[in-house]
Amino acid sequence: MKRHNYKLFGFESFDEFMETIKNSEPEIRFVRFWTADMLGERQCDFSVPSYSISDKNLRKGFDASSMYPERINESDKIAHFDIKTARVFPIVYKTKTPGFEREWREIIVFGDVVDQDNKPYVYDSRSKLKQVIEKAKKITGGDRIYLGPELEFFLFRADEFGNPIVKDGKPVIADKGAYFKGGLHGQVRKEVVLLLSEMGYIFEYDHHEVANSQHEIDVKYMDALDMADFVMLYRYCVKRVAKSHGLFASFMPKPLLDVNGSGMHVHQSIFNGRKNLFFDKDDKYNLSEMAYQYMAGIMTHAPEITLFTNQWINSYRRLVPGFEAPVYICWDLQNRSNLIRKPEYEPGNELATRLELRSPDPSCNPYLAFSLIISAGLKGIEEKYRKPEPSNRDVYHISPSERDALGIKSLPGSLEEAINLAENSGLVKEVLGERFLNDYIVRKRTEVEIFKSE
């Protein structure tokens, strides 16, 4: 990566931000604002000319009724630019108009949506995650909620318009690799890593996944809010790089019914400085009381938050036994049939001690998913939930009566069931607010009804 005398990311002040805009080569001509809509399916994404930015002008008004279920007469909202999230996008744009040859770049900035009175907008999911993080710090005494999601995706052949080619009712796969084994399109992963690395992200590895044409790129753990922003940017970059290779990248949980689906296993820990609050060297599994309570909270509330970790009809085609996706609510160390596991790559290593939630999928709204996951864990800490005992059984292959005897419950089996559980959840209502939850459920119930009528 070329060295510069100005920052590309990690801005600590407005002056640093403007220094980069003034000195960048090619010139940064646009500042691009990003945040999520209710579903995280598309960004609230618009650009302003870089010359219009000032330290008194880091806010732009927009019509929220086009993105959110807002009332027309209350639709004027404000996008608030968070300069600390700004990252120079490495791709250089070129004009295509003959006689007007120019090059430029843009800088991407995440932020929040607020009302005219500067209060968090009721439908802004990013603000909700910020509130959960602040609550977590108060409850746990920690200063960092670290998350490390594993985002899997498929690469399919694309037509000249960038759409997936479909044959015999299925998208056409692009390679026949396998877990940690080759495949034709490792370069796509490498380009994604290089692109995002130039924006300041640190990666651990990339590899082919279990199914044909399935891939994974793992970024180093980050603070929960930074990680949610990253998920939005990662999905965009993967799709963009794939398209340049004549491929279509899909984060759909189960695009092919006869192979493993794509998950987003979320690794979690809470730190105070360098101290891992989930670690206890004297415990058999090196887990602290707080870690067990946090785990118990997630296990207790998993059914009612699944609507937000697995928000599509297609999500429940992945959550079935036999394809490495968790269905049953239990935990163990290395047992991948369980909902939660404690990775044992480095036993006894305090910094590596963490919990891994295996049910979420990569098509979720990361701000909502992370908000509900963390909140479920916090509920366990607040109310001192009882330590759950590990399950060392392959729960896919024991009878329903055995599971009942062991007290092992299941995740919801359909979007409709997940909607009903979320609707009646005090925890979900507390985190998201009644208005947000009601409108979200209306949207999801409509999705179910449309599916049933087809």
Image: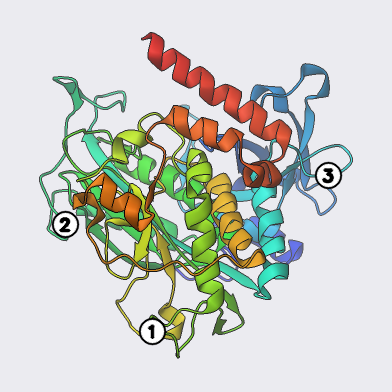
Image position of 66 (left or right of 269): right
Q: Which mark is residue 284?
A: 1
The residue shown at (49%, 85%) is: 280
- The amino acid sitting under disc 3 is Lys
Disc 3 is placed on an element classified as loop
- The quadrant in which the N terminus is found is bottom left
Disc 1 is placed on an element classified as loop
Q: Residues within 10 Å of mark 2 (few under 14, many from 20)?
A: some
Q: Residues within 10 Å of mark 1 (few under 14, many from 20)?
A: few
Cα separation, mark 1 vs mark 2, equals: 31 Å
The residue shown at (48%, 20%) is: 447
Examine the rendering and report whether any part of residue 24 can be seen: no
Quickly name the residue at label 3: 119
The residue shown at (66%, 22%) is: 66
The residue shown at (48%, 43%) is: 306
Q: Residue 12 placed where, x, y %?
A: 70, 68
Please say if 423 is above or below 302: above
